[in-house]
Image (cartoon, rainbow, N blue to C red):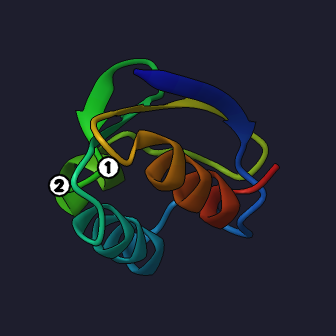
Amino acid sequence: MRQQTVTVTIPGGIHARIAAELAAVVAAHTSSVFLMAGRMTSLARSWEVLGLGVSQGEQVTVIADGRDEEQALAAVVALLGH
């Protein structure tokens, strides 16, 4: 299991398009990937990710677990920010 804290740099935070992109990134990997922002949810469930209400500038933790966890984690972190 790998995890990394990231500051969301996306203007407007995580909105519908970004949530869909995150789900697509996760679907391209075999690992399970979660987002922790007050509570934890799977990034494969875009509607739940939207429910977190993550804003630009907010810090979140990305958690990946599985065979390609390093690649999955890097892909999600690259999409969210630095």
Q: Which mark is residue 49?
A: 1
Q: For the point 37% across and 74% down, which residue is it?
A: 16
Q: For this rendering, which residue is in front, 43 or 13?
A: 43
Q: Are marks 2 and 1 in contact (CB under 8 Å)?
A: yes
Residue 17 position, x and y percent, is 42, 81
Q: For this rendering, which residue is in front, 55 or 21?
A: 21
Q: Is residue 51 above or below residue 24?
A: above
Q: For the point 62% across and 66% down, which residue is it?
A: 79
Q: In the figure, is residue 82 to the left or right of 32?
A: right
* Amino acid tagged 1: Val
Q: For the point 56% across and 61% down, which residue is it?
A: 75
For residue 52, what is the image quadrant?
A: top left
Mark 2 surroundings within 10 Å by alpha-carbon count, few (fewer than 14), some (14 through 19), many (20 or more): some
Q: Is residue 16 above or below residue 5?
A: below
For label 2, the residue is 45
Q: Is residue 77 above or below residue 28?
A: above
